[in-house]
Amino acid sequence: MRNHAERRGGKRASLVSLTLGLLTALLPKCPLCIAAALSVMGMTAGMARIIGLTLRPMGALLALAALGVLLYRGVRAHLRAKTQPHQV
């Protein structure tokens, strides 16, 4: 039973990590890319500056969240491997 719950939790963590990574990759990062994406949506240069100021920290937060999930999974797997006896 415990193995099934661990597998389900691992799949959930993988999905969260994948989602955060994809959102980070899809978020425009340079000012010109942000302006181009917003102009496609019909927004002006003034709006591009305001939205651009919020998108950059949001991208950094998404990247840090994805990194945090990966580090958490790595540490958890390391601790689990340390506590379980080796099977031959």
Image (tube, rainbow, N blue to C red):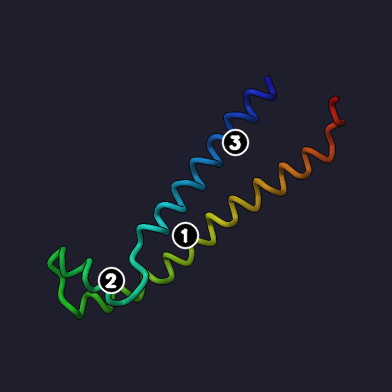
Q: Residue at x 65, y 46 (%)?
A: 73
Q: Which residue is mark 3?
A: 10
Q: Which quadrant does the N terminus fall into?
A: top right
Q: Residue at x 35, y 57 (%)?
A: 26
- Kind of residue sitting beneath label 1: Leu
Q: Are marks 1 and 2 in contact (CB under 8 Å)?
A: no
Position above or below: 58 against 73: below
Q: Which mark is residue 33?
A: 2
Q: Residue at x 79, y 38 (%)?
A: 81
In the current view of this chain or complex, which residue is farthest to the top?
1
Q: Which mark is residue 26?
A: none
- Kind of residue sitting beneath label 3: Gly
Q: Nearer the viewer, mark 2 or mark 3?
A: 2
Q: Nearer the viewer, mark 1 or mark 2?
A: 2
Q: Which residue is mark 1?
A: 62
Instruction: Determine whether the residue tagged by mark 3 lies in a helix, strand or loop.
Output: helix
Q: Percent position (x, y) of residue 28? A: 33, 66
Q: Mark 1 and mark 2: span between their CA atoms?
A: 18 Å
Q: Nearer the viewer, residue 51 or 26?
A: 26
Position above or below: 67 against 78: below
Instruction: Determine whether the residue tagged by mark 2 lies in a helix, strand or loop.
Output: helix
